[in-house]
Image: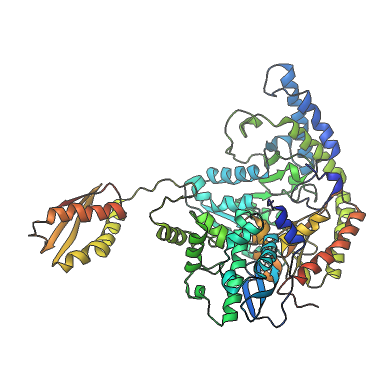
Amino acid sequence: MWEYTDLVKEHFLNPRNVGEVENASGTGDVGSLACGDALKLTIKVDENGVITDAKFKTFGCASAIASSSALTEMVKGMTLDEAAKITNEDIADFLGGLPKEKMHCSVMGREALEAAIADYRGMALPMAEGEIVCECFGVTDLDIIRAINESNLRSVEEITNFTKAGGGCGKCEDRLREILQQTVSGSTLEWIKPMEKPKKMTTLQKIKKIEEVLEREIRPGLRKDGGDIELLDVDGDFVSVSLRGACKSCSKSQTTIKEYVEKKLRELVLDTLIVEEN
Amino acid sequence: MDLHHDAVIYMDNNATTRIAPEVLEAMMPYLADYYGNPSSMHTFGGQVGQAIARARGQVASLLGAEPEEITFTSCGTESDSTAILSALQTFPEKRHVVTTRVEHPAIKNLCENLDRLTGHKHRVTRLKVAADGTLDLDEYAEALTEDTAIVSVMWANNETGVIFPIEKMARMARERGILFHTDAVQAVGKVPINLKELDIDFLSLSGHKLHAPKGVGVLYVRRGTMFVPFLTGGHQEKGRRGGTENVASIVALGRACDLAAEKMADENTRVKAMRDRLEEGLLAAVPKSMLNGHKTDRLPNTSNISFEFVEGEAILLHMNRYNICASSGSACTSGSLEPSHVLRAMGVPFTAAHGSIRFSLSTYNTEAEVDLVLEKMPGIIESLRQMSPFWKGN
């Protein structure tokens, strides 16, 4: 089923450094039986901060076992600072590459290494502060953002391949898309959505959305200047509004309507809307 | 292609089967010399129609059905979609479907996409299974409503081999005037089926599970049942399924059905005994191993065993070194990131679900092969356990 490189097969069938370091200087324990992947990494660090030994125990597939074996080979002889720079891409490269659906195995390797180093240094892990996005696999928003940035991810499918998020019940898919857009805003994104017909907004939907945007984005600014705006009606693409307070008598009101309000509504609701003052 | 059939120990028959030599022999002339289109006017094409008619009779005979109740399709999946969608279109005001939580993706994913496929909102009841994979008939009875368009319950589960009480369930549906479909893909050829005496309206069958080629299947439609075609096109199969017939594979399937009838006894005695010996041997030799699924209400050839604290893909790849072929219910082998929905529905704990291996035998397996698997498996599991952070030793 998977196209594994010879190196992956080699490290799976003849894994290096299986076991547990005695009196380990640091231990990294990641994953779980529920997830289907788990890695326990133990390292020995000498007085110069050099990793002199590393061993692993892994519950998982060929990619997981090979990634663990590769990782222990890579870190032996490195200083802690050098080891801390290892990315999941490095682990995958060491093995000549992993199938994209298995990249999360290399991420697990990197996570175990971080945990072991943090354990040695007596520090808490930065990732522990994130907010859980994917409940099925316990993936936080920080995990996801990191994967997006480190591995240049551009689609929800890739996020799943690298973090497993979204690979279970799928309920967090919209949130993943959101995080992706926020993290990569400005670049061209690949939207891979299953066969969906383009949604047409009903008038009711338009009104709701426009009210939301007015309240969130537009009113605060106007109110600061003593003005306000009211939504009167929506007819097709025509949005009828009324300016209030200071705005009503302001010479700049036409500019406000067109430039500011219309621009915002076109950006956040529907790009064909036309705003008119009544 | 490096690895030949002769070199492997093939215990993955629920995934697909070898084309029987007799079946291959029966179909070859229709690939080589008799390639005419059965719908043609000329003898060269028309004569092929007779071969198809003969195959239809052979399939009907195995199922205890009439030839006109047999429609040839491309596969079990097509038969499943055809049956369900036909029922929904026949009773468009009925929007409820009853099925189970352990169906094959052909039914499971179909039922998750009914709204998209039909343009109407549907409600689907998925019957639960107990820890041994069996259904609760009381829960089933309560699920049947006036709004139910069709019931679809598999005859035998592909992962565990558990057999459902189809006869009783079909009767209960019939009593309430509800259509009953069964995906019998795994059961045909392994257990006797006599549709004349059952209240089943639709039945799906797959060629490649029956020692026939891939790319051919059957949908049985009880005489008198209203039917809406799925594949619309030419008038083939009496207008029930458009598309030029896959003649060679249909001929093959016919021959395979005859063969299945001949081998049914062997399947339920010798093959069953091999399966039992393999299963008992593994459960005895490997600590912390357990059987998934009911021990007796199941197919004679299937054994689904969990080995705790180790993972399925890793086990299969080690078995692969010895050319032993089987399947797993682990997340890594499922193609998604979650372990088998069947095992999860049975409540198999995570310690075991990821480490499940399915052996599915056929009449082509031998005692020597069982010996070899019994010899190699304990060592494979032990070496993976040595590597596992969850294994604390005996």
Determine if residue A122 is in view. yes
Determine if residue B299 is in view. no
Count of marks placed on residues = 0
* Position in image of residue B108 (x %, y %): 61, 54
Residue occupying the far right of the picture: B368
Q: Residue at x 68, y 17 (%)?
A: B41
* Position in image of residue B205 (x %, y %): 71, 44
Residue occupying the far front of the picture: A48
Q: Quadrant of the N terminus of chain B?
A: top right
Quadrant in which residue B54 is drawn: top right
Q: Please name whichever residue, B162 or B158, is drawn nearer the observer in this view of the structure.
A: B158
Q: Residue at x 12, y 56 (%)?
A: A253
Q: Residue at x 80, y 68 (%)?
A: B383
Left or right: A152 with respect to B355? Answer: left
Quadrant in which residue A102 is drawn: bottom right
Q: How is the image coloured?
A: rainbow
Residue occupying the far top of the picture: B42
Q: Please name whichever residue, A94 or B64, is drawn nearer the observer in this view of the structure.
A: A94
Q: Quadrant of the C terminus of chain B?
A: bottom right
Q: Residue at x 59, y 76 (%)?
A: A117
Left or right: B129 with respect to A152? Answer: right
Above or below — where is A29 with respect to A163?
Answer: below
* Position in image of residue B245 (x %, y %): 68, 30
* Position in image of residue A36 (x %, y %): 65, 66
Q: Please name whichever residue, B256 or B344, is drawn nearer the observer in this view of the structure.
A: B344
Left or right: B288 with respect to B240? Answer: right
